Amino acid sequence: MPEAPLPVAENVATARALAERRRISLVWALVANFGGLLVVAMLAVFGFAFWSASGNTIELLRDRAESAVHQLQQRLREHLDTPAAQLKLMAAEIGSGRIAPERTAEFDAFMLGGLAGMPQLRVLSFVRPDLKARGAQRVGDAIKTGEADLAALPNVAAVARQAWARQEVGWTPPIYNPLVRQTVIASAQPVVRDGQVVGVLIAVISIEELSDYVDRVGRESNAIAFILYGRDHVLAHWNMKSEAMRPSVEAPVPTLLRFGDPVLAALWNDRYNAGRIFVARPPVENRTIRFAGETYPFFYTELSGYSDKPLLVGLYTRTSDFRDIIGRLVLAAAAGLVAILGAIVMAVLIGRRLARPVRRISEAATLVGDLRVSEVQPLPRSRIREIDEQARAFNAMTRALRWFETYVPKPLARHLLKTGDASAVESEQRHLTVMFTDIAGFSTASQAQDAAAVAAYLNRHFGIVNSCIEAEGGIVDKYIGDSVMAFWGAPEKLKNRAERACRAALAIRAAIAEENAACRARGMPETRMRIGIHSGDATVGNIGSSSRINYTIIGDMVNVGQRIEQLAKVLAPKEEAVAVLISETTRADLGSDFAPRSLGRHKLRGREGDMEIFAL
């Protein structure tokens, strides 16, 4: 049995395998270098451009949102300050006596004019200390005047009492007015005559009207506007007119949670907080939420002085509403990505184009390394100078190797290439098996043929013999006229060298039989051969001078092998096309697969003693 490989050898083989796996192809090396530099450069350019564009876009959207919030705040102040300023003028007229509530017709006309000049008001009334109120009210598209007793409306009466105590204009918190069946906010202005409060002018704005106004302002900015009473109640919103609101004295305005806008209801819920996409500048604040797969940025600011609690006025929109702007950013990013992918594809194509001739050379070199030089196709020329020079040099080398292949046995060359060890061809003593073949009657037959025909016949014959020998791992040492000398057991050590030689002989017999059948069909002469096989010790290695050397075997066993082949002239039957004789030492090395027939003991020419000869 062959010796087990040493652990060191296994480690070396493993290390080589790992190193082989770590190597990358020329294509990917070019892609990694050329493509990598290009991609990095493009990423830097497109990255900076996209970062700058996205930053500018976010700033633009933030500026638009902040501007819309400031505009909403300013217009709400104007919307609410106008009634308060008008009440001061009307209170001065009543306090001076020029307008007297006692003169009913004149007073009604005065109130009608005041209400008509302030379209945002629902009710304009004058409340006397006895809580009797007289004024004008909008009913549908008409304005009507009349009188009411506020004593039955405690929350409305409280507004008048607070104004008397304050003795200055002020805004009430949201209250539910049963007379108009709506939640309202009111501005109350005390009327002073001769230092005494003689009544209170009240301007009432309904939440529905305020919500309509806020909605109109919000739509101008393509956003949903709102006013919060504190942080947890909704004062104005487009949905305030919904029948589901149903305000009451106890709950004049809805809370965020029971309001009909789930997006607004999620404003302060940290569960939906999407972080700070925008960074608003004071006094505007920002909060972004993500709800139902959509992102909503909120912008809001405080509106003070119009209720008992700060009012938060703001607006929100969906990021999908910025689709055009975001779309341009995405398109720019996509264009950059396409350009980068194009650069990678270009790098791959260039890498493949450059690697193709290198791969051809590598594949051809692999064939040369396996001594399959006849299979190597000439490498094509290239427009790249270095690759073209390499292809021409390689083609010249393969032409020389084809001649080299003709004169050097392939198994020997393969062994040298495989081991890479010069000591493998140093002369040494080994147990070998040698074969001699000879064509019977060739010298006589060749005299009647011209040189070209003889050469063609021998070349065809040697091709058959040579292929059978090499198929069994034998080395064709030399051609001697019409004879072939081959051996087994060197340079590679073979345990079954005798069996291989015998199998090669049987293969030659079968091939010659097939060749003879073809010759008979064409009316050509058949080939008859003699083969002798012997095993024994011989010297094998490089034999010759420094200018001409030959890897061969020498020794007495070589002569014995030739004598056995010549003995077939006498021992082989005349009708046998290929006679194969083997020595007793070769017979001893054969396994049970072979059953050679003994021909007795015979004396060999030029040798003392005799030897048992067998027919295969």
Image (cartoon, rainbow, N blue to C red):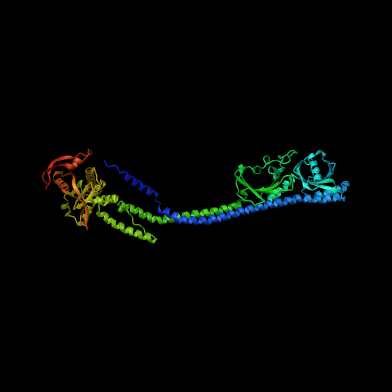
- Would residue 49 be found to the left or right of residue 415 on screen? right
Q: Quadrant of the C terminus?
A: top left
Question: Residue 482: percent from the left, percent from the top?
Answer: 19, 52
- Would residue 108 be found to the left or right of residue 516 on screen? right
Q: Is residue 190 above or below residue 547?
A: above
The residue that appears at 35% across and 58% down in the rendered structure is 391
How many numbered callouts? 0
Q: Is residue 255 above or below residue 99?
A: above
Q: Quadrant of the N terminus?
A: top left
Residue nearer the viewer, 238 or 170: 170
Question: Which image quarter: residue 55?
Answer: bottom right
Residue nearer the viewer, 216 or 193: 193
Question: Residue 511: percent from the left, percent from the top?
Answer: 24, 46
**Residue 96 visible:** yes
**Residue 530 visible:** no
Report the residue that reaches farthest toward the left. Answer: 608
Report the residue that reaches farthest toward the right. Answer: 103
Question: Residue 195: percent from the left, percent from the top?
Answer: 85, 48
- Would residue 534 be found to the left or right of residue 330 on screen? left
- Would residue 36 be found to the left or right of residue 264 on screen? left
Question: Residue 291: percent from the left, percent from the top?
Answer: 61, 43
The residue that appears at 63% across and 52% down in the rendered structure is 62
